[in-house]
């Protein structure tokens, strides 16, 4: 009997270790806005206190088993000890220069607008070299935990580092679901465009853009990566100026109104389609 129980336990561990990151999100988003001055900051790893980067929550709760999005600030010269995470996260650099790679890898500094993916169980270090360093992190499950590399495992996913200069942008005229007159550009980051599957894109709005985004998904969340956008849920609602690091969510069939004075890049995570109008 003991052998049977231990065998079942070992199988359970193997299943946990190789589990893939969820590809859908059942939580419905709502019409909400979080501006820079509304962000609640704490420590990313409370156990390390002020030796840890600061973390600011945008949606969800990274300490619970649920999807969430949050900002992380790193001091210049920060370098983490080698570690793993129990879940996969995706990240976009908002400010500064960040390095995230194998503990033995040479430093590859990712500038603002770059993207990386860190698989669950993969040993790595994170470092910062800019005067101000900030990234946005997106997780599909939680809680977000930091563990020693002795607990490393392979969940089948692989790390990705993409410098912003290597992103591939599609123009509005190349996409049926984007108004050609909008002159926006889109870069696909991760996920699947099959029905009801999570996906994330970078949406680049030109200076002088005036239009809207119609959400056709039960789950739509957006984070300003660079630039500045004026946001309004409808003509009757108040306007909010959203700078880099700000967030807005949208209900199904909502069409937030957006306008820009400068070129602006927005990270959009959705559980389905959206239209730029």
Image: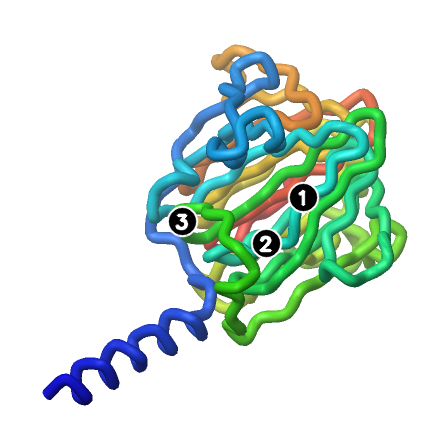
Distance, label 1 to label 2, CA atoms, is 8 Å
Nearer-the-camera pick, 235 or 145: 145
Q: Which residue is mark 1?
A: 80
Determine whether 191 is above or below 62 in the image.
below
Please give the count of numbered marks on the rendered protein. Answer: 3
Nearer-the-camera pick, 265 or 9: 9
Q: Are marks 3 and 1 in contact (CB under 8 Å)?
A: no
Local secondary structure at mark 2 = loop
Q: Which residue is mark 3?
A: 142
Instruction: Work out whether mark 3 precedes mark 1 in sequence or the reverse, and give the earlier one.
Output: 1
Instruction: Give the residue displayed 51% in from the left and 70% down from the top.
Output: 153
Mark 3, other Cα within 10 Å: few <14 / some 14–19 / many ≥20: some
Work out which quarter of the rendered image holds the C terminus and state it: top right
Q: Which picture quadrant has residue 76?
A: top right
Mark 1, other Cα within 10 Å: few <14 / some 14–19 / many ≥20: some
Q: Position of residue 105 (x, y in %)?
A: 81, 61
Q: Give me the disc on residue 83.
A: 2
Residue 211 appearing in the image: no
Local secondary structure at mark 3 = loop
Q: Position of residue 192 (x, y in %)?
A: 55, 66
Q: Are marks 1 and 2 in contact (CB under 8 Å)?
A: yes
Nearer-the-camera pick, 9 or 189: 9
Distance, label 3 to label 2, CA atoms, is 17 Å
Mark 2, other Cα within 10 Å: few <14 / some 14–19 / many ≥20: many
Q: Position of residue 97 (x, y in %)?
A: 82, 39
Q: Are marks 3 and 2 in contact (CB under 8 Å)?
A: no
């Amino acid at each position: 009997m003991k052998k049977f129980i231990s065998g079942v336990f070992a199988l359970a561990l193997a299943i946990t270790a190789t589990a893939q990151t969820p590809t859908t999100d059942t939580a419905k988003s709502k019409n909400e806005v979080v501006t820079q001055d509304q962000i609640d900051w704490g420590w990313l790893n409370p156990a390390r206190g002020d030796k840890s980067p600061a973390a600011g929550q945008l949606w969800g709760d990274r300490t619970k088993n649920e999807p969430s999005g949050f900002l992380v600030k790193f001091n210049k010269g920060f370098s983490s000890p080698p570690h793993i995470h129990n879940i996969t996260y995706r990240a976009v650099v908002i400010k500064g220069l960040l390095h995230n790679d194998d503990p033995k890898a040479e430093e590859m500094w990712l500038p603002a607008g770059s993207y990386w993916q860190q698989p669950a169980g993969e040993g790595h270090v994170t470092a910062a070299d800019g005067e101000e360093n900030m990234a946005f992190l997106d997780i599909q499950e939680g809680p977000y935990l930091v563990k020693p590399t002795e607990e490393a495992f392979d969940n089948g996913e692989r790390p990705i580092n993409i410098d912003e200069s290597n992103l591939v942008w599609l123009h509005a005229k190349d996409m049926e679901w984007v108004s050609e007159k909008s002159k926006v550009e889109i870069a696909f980051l991760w996920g699947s465009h099959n029905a009801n599957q999570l996906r994330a894109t970078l949406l680049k709005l030109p200076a002088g853009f005036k239009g809207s985004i119609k959400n056709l998904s039960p789950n739509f969340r957006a984070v300003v990566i660079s630039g500045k956008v004026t946001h309004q849920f409808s003509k009757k609602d108040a306007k909010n100026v959203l700078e880099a690091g700000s967030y807005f969510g949208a209900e199904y069939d909502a069409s937030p109104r957006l306008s820009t004075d400068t070129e602006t890049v927005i990270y959009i995570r959705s559980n389905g389609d959206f239209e730029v109008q």
